[in-house]
Image (cartoon, helix red, strand yellow):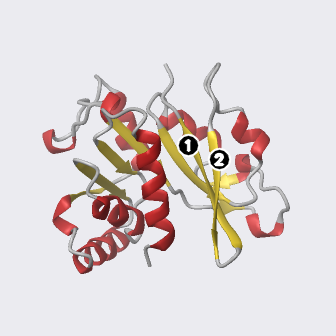
Amino acid sequence: MLTCPSKIAEDILSHSQSNPQKTTIIDLFAGAGGNSIAFALSEKWDRVIAIEKDAATLACAQHNAAVYGVADTITWVHGDSLDFLARLKDRGGKGGLDHSLQVDPARTCLFASPPWGGVSYRDQDVFDLSTMEPYNLATLHDACRPMGHALYLPRTSDLRQIAKLAPAGRKIEVVQYCMEGASKAMVVYIPASE
């Protein structure tokens, strides 16, 4: 279950090591918990926060984390990730959040593996990320800025759209993740910007 999430967790760690103050990772769309579990299993993060909007899916993620022995090392949030980010940005990480959820944005890395709804990405040679639903690329990036973030996107995502996310004078890294000889998805690593 954890092959690809484990590699992604390792890569996020290597990106955050260039900024060793990163101690918290927030999985914005936890789903069934694969990525959150991989982050917790790495034992490289002081805090792993997992956000999931659907209560049944969150319960499944918590069960899966228990199977892997890390349920108690993950802070689980039942709620909307974009609302969480808006509140996090308000007053430097303390805006209206319960004390246990307050973080220092300068020490936090975001990971977003959003739903890929809307126009079918499988039917397009190059997937237009502005059509992705319920959150398109611009919405996700705007919600995650100014913190460093990693976006898990369809393998055929439009690289021209992604290139526009690079902060002025900075580079972003795009990694294709393959399993059994085929590309499954890409992750875009975007550094923090002012």
Residue at horizontal 43%, vertical 56%?
A: 10
Q: Which mark is residue 174?
A: 2
Snapshot quadrant of residue 120: bottom right
Do labels 2 and 1 touch, CB within 8 Å?
A: yes
Q: Secondary structure at mark 1?
A: strand
Which is more N-terminal, label 1 or label 2?
A: 2
Task: Using the image as rendered, state which of residue 193 and residue 124 is in the foreground.
Answer: 193
Total number of numbered labels?
A: 2
Answer yes or no: is residue 32 visible.
yes
Task: Using the image as rendered, state which of residue 39 and residue 98 is in the foreground.
Answer: 39
> Residue 80, how many percent across, how many down?
39, 51
Answer yes or no: is residue 134 visible.
no
Quadrant where the N terminus is found in the figure = bottom left
Q: Secondary structure at mark 2?
A: strand
Snapshot quadrant of residue 34: bottom left
Q: Which mark is residue 20?
A: none
- Kindly identify which residue carries mark 1: 189
Q: CA distance from mark 2 to mark 1?
A: 6 Å
Tell me the kind of residue under disc 1: Tyr
Tell me the kind of residue under disc 2: Val
> Residue 41, how many percent across, how many down?
29, 64
**Mark 2 crowdedness (10 Å alpha carbons): few <14, some 14-19, many ≥20:** some
**Mark 1 crowdedness (10 Å alpha carbons): few <14, some 14-19, many ≥20:** many
Q: Is residue 164 above or below residue 2?
A: above
> Residue 88, how many percent across, how many down?
32, 34
> Residue 60, how many percent across, how many down?
33, 76
Residue at horizontal 56%, vertical 38%?
A: 141
Residue at horizontal 72%, vertical 46%?
A: 130
